[in-house]
Image (cartoon, grey):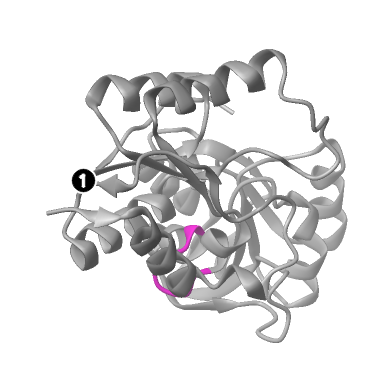
Amino acid sequence: MACTRQQLCDFLDELLRPERFQDYCPNGLQVEGVEEINYLVTGVTASQALLDEARGRGADAILVHHGYFWRSEDARITGMKAQRVRTLMTANINLLAYHLPLDCHPQHGNNVMLGQLMGVTTPAPIDPDDSGTPVFQGSLEAPMPVSALADRLGAALDRQPLVVGDGSVQSVAWCTGAGQGYIDQAADAGADVYVSGEVSEQTVHVARERGIAFIAAGHHATERYGVQAVGEAVAGALGIRHEFIDIDNPA
């Protein structure tokens, strides 16, 4: 089966509702390609390696979490950006990207999917009234050592996390990707541990001084699952082929 480019865009916009967010990049169709979509590839970042893999496999569209045209970046299409856009346009491949809407979706989002991997019950936004804050919270079924939670994440993500602190944890707050700056909100909410993709130098001090454990599990590693779930939802609803391509990234 196949769908049109407009049907794909409409489905994703209805599912992810990008109009709710003040984001750092345009959400939705970023580079226009062929009209008929038979085969959708998903990935975390629209890197040259992902584009080349998708082109080699005959994809009609690529859906990613990290696309192009970020706020405050140089708007000129030169150098690396030009090569990427040239690859898409030469192969007539559509590029679609959703950033915060993909982090925050209550069923298929990066945060909900990571919460499932951690074994968190009833994951929910830490501030339901603020759609621009992509921090979730929930509880483990029973208390466990923070080292055991890190081991669980390491096994699920195939990456050994960085751990700050020790002791038993049950209340968890988290934000995938570069969410380390929200650690104060997690502490204010009474979380025992805050989990994110990245760590900054100051994050360690905040964790120690505010008495909250912290786990950094990798930006790429924590954001592989939302786009896969959305791709599967697209395939089920529109009847097209879907494949996730994981371009390894240790960050």
Per the image, label 1 sits on a secondary structure element best described as loop
Rendered location of residue 119, percent (x, y):
38, 65
The residue furthest top is: 79
What residue is shown with label 1?
38
Quarter of the image where one finds residue 251:
top right
Query: What segment is highlighted magenta in the picture?
Result: 105-110
Give the vertical position of 63 relative to 6 (above or below): above
- Please give the name of the residue rendered at 61% of the width and 46% of the height, measured from the top-left corner: 177
Q: Is residue 10 left or right of residue 21?
A: left
Rendered location of residue 44, percent (x, y):
48, 39
Give the vertical position of 32 relative to 192 (above or below): above
- Please give the name of the residue rendered at 39% of the width and 34% of the height, measured from the top-left corner: 93
Q: Is residue 185 visible?
A: yes
What amino acid does circle 1 point to?
A: Asn
Rendered location of residue 51, percent (x, y):
43, 25
Q: Is residue 107 magenta?
A: yes
- Please give the name of the residue rendered at 65% of the width and 65% of the height, measured from the top-left corner: 134
Q: Is residue 58 left or right of residue 69?
A: left
Q: Nearer the viewer, residue 34 or 236?
A: 34
Rendered location of residue 193, percent (x, y):
64, 61
